[in-house]
Amino acid sequence: MPLFIHFGLALVALASLSLQVAAHGANANASANAFQQHCLSFAPEKLIWNSTRTHLEYVANGTTLEFPDNVASCARPQQLVSADLCRIALSIPTSQRSSIALELWLPEQWSQARYVSTGNGGIDGCVKYEDLAYTTSNGFAAMGTNNGHNGTTGVTFLNNPDIVEDFAYRALHTGTATGKLLTEKFYNKTPAYSYYLGCSLGGRMGIKAAELYPDDFDGIIAGCPAVDFNYLQGERAMFYPITGAAGSPNFIEPDLWTGLIHNEVLKQCDALDGVKDGIIEVPDRCYFQPETLLCRPWWWPFGKSSPCLNFQQVLQLRQIYAPYTYPNRTLIFPRMNPGNEIFAVQKFFAGAPFSYSEDWFRYVVLSQPTWNAATYNETLVALAQELNPFDIQTYPQTLPAFKEKGGKLLSYHGGQDNQITSFNTERFWDRMAEADPQLQDWYRFFRISGMFHCNSGPGAWIVGQGGGAAAAGIPFEPQQNVLAAMVAWVEKGQAPGSLTGTKLVNDTLSMGIDFQRTHCLYPSTQTYIGGDYKLPSSWRCQ
Ligand SMILES: *[C@@H]1O[C@H](CO)[C@@H](O)[C@H](O)[C@H]1NC(C)=O
Ligand SMILES: *[C@@H]1O[C@H](CO)[C@@H](O)[C@H](O)[C@H]1NC(C)=O
Ligand SMILES: *[C@@H]1O[C@H](CO)[C@@H](O)[C@H](O)[C@H]1NC(C)=O
Ligand SMILES: *[C@@H]1O[C@H](CO)[C@@H](O)[C@H](O)[C@H]1NC(C)=O
Ligand SMILES: *[C@@H]1O[C@H](CO)[C@@H](O)[C@H](O)[C@H]1NC(C)=O
Ligand SMILES: *[C@@H]1O[C@H](CO)[C@@H](O)[C@H](O)[C@H]1NC(C)=O
Ligand SMILES: *[C@@H]1O[C@H](CO)[C@@H](O)[C@H](O)[C@H]1NC(C)=O
Ligand SMILES: [Ca+2]
């Protein structure tokens, strides 16, 4: 009998134990399942007028999402997702002849109630899935659109101003209005703060949003912004007529750019900041003189022997590194960043049309699909600016409504940018500062030394400016991460005074950190004060 009781007790104990285990597992799965169910039963297409649902799925942290319907030129066939989230994709008409493809990723963990819109690049219609993954992994509800068209070319702009209008401003605004509304309906809570994160064309999109829709965002990160867009396209188109086609007489071969010319730029400019480290810390003081590369005549004892450049090639370099002006010397666009050659040779100096400019002139400015980019000249940039479709120029001197409502704007720009010169962002910020001496109260600019376009380069370029490598290995905290810096500025009033960038060994996370450097708040300038140049403390902003 005692044995029986004992057995009975044991049975009860065992049963309650397994009940506990089951209950625990069920709870964990119950909440995951509840989120999953909530996701799958959400009906975004019923909330957005005329929209069509293309995807609705629960995505578990660690999943590599495939995008079989994404066009190949966007070169984003898949994306690793680093949060449990609900993925919504819609197609939304913006006019009779245009629509946007929208992605909204809503993370299960949304305790801070932050919303972010992400931007595009080039003249493309490519959702930056890496930025959606990056921001959702940090708890943001994140939206991105195809900017009104798919792929990396401008073909769809031809004779369709509706698509150009989406591209100029409407796709982002429509996507943002949709994204914020669906976020609110999904969580049954209004986003507490709204942000924007973009670079290059995406930088321009952010500034245009501040101009047209000041209520869309509390904080806007406009990296390497493609502002003064029409003139920018002219400047980018300028290089090809100067260099000529690859293989043409006097064409400067790529290995001369990456070897001879780049090394000579560094020889003249690297040490201006006090340290020979391959980084031009103060590009403003670097005025490259290509004459030093001129080949000496065979009968003359002085000067450079092979590898060297002929007189015509030196003239090309003089034009390439000079400010771009009309014949009457009126500035069209500031001079290129010296030190960008290693990457710039792949596009600007490749002896081929720069595709974004070529497409812009072909399909928007001239509506001539066969226009030959070799015939580009200043008459055309003047025409582009005159047309200025939907005020795509994006060159405000003031943003009164955005400032008034307490909006915060932040730009960063690489000092060795190979696609948009950082001198243009200096000019843009300076021009706004002329109108508002207290500009830093709400618009701050950081120059990232040794960074190419938006990312990469010899400098400490990782500042959390986007997904993938741009946030690798750094914490989400304001000193080292520009998005976290914006969050602290908007939500706590802590304005960023500097940004510490990180350089990984060989740009490879597993190889560890090579060095860090603290980038200065413009217009203060990075100054070497002595010591190990790889330590941030060996430099000071002055
Ligand atoms: C929760 O469910 C998943 C599959 O839906 C299963 O693999 C997992 O073992 C379950 N967890 C627990 C603790 O029961
Ligand atoms: C654009 O791409 C999206 C997927 O990213 C696809 O759903 C849509 O049909 C495409 N639109 C056009 C016009 O090809
Ligand atoms: C996603 O999973 C990884 C690996 O387990 C984890 O480190 C990370 O914190 C998870 N992300 C979120 C947002 O929970
Ligand atoms: C919205 O849908 C209606 C029919 O449901 C259609 O007539 C109208 O053209 C659509 N609007 C746009 C902008 O596509
Ligand atoms: C220089 O030429 C451009 C283009 O023709 C013109 O727009 C500009 O007004 C001129 N500037 C001066 C100072 O004449
Ligand atoms: C620019 O090119 C156009 C057509 O290609 C030509 O008509 C015009 O004369 C050129 N202008 C200059 C300043 O060379
Ligand atoms: C550095 O990276 C490049 C390109 O990713 C690779 O080819 C090279 O082997 C790497 N170097 C080292 C030392 O790992
Ligand atoms: Ca240096």
Image (tube, grey):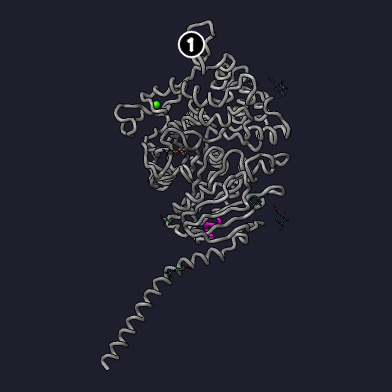
- At x 49% / y 47%, what residue is drawn? 195
Residue 293 in view here: yes
Give the quadrant of residue 394: top right
Q: Is residue 512 above or below residue 53?
A: above
Residue 503 among those drawn in magenta: no
Q: Does 54 sit left or right of 456 as displayed?
A: right
- At x 62% / y 43%, what residue is drawn? 73
Q: Nearer the viewer, residue 189 or 424?
A: 424
Which quarter holds ligand 3?
A: bottom left
In this view, the residue farthest toward the left is 2
- At x 59% / y 30%, what residue is drawn? 232
Q: Quadrant of the N terminus?
A: bottom left
Q: Position of residue 210 (x, y in %)?
A: 53, 41
Q: How many marks?
A: 1
In this picture, which residue range is highlighted in magenta?
Answer: 180-185
Q: For the residue marked with disc 1, what is the amino acid? A: Gly
Q: Nearer the viewer, residue 473 or 248?
A: 248
> Residue at label 1?
303
Q: Position of residue 32 (x, y in %)?
A: 46, 65
Q: Residues within 10 Å of mark 1 (few under 14, many from 20)?
A: few
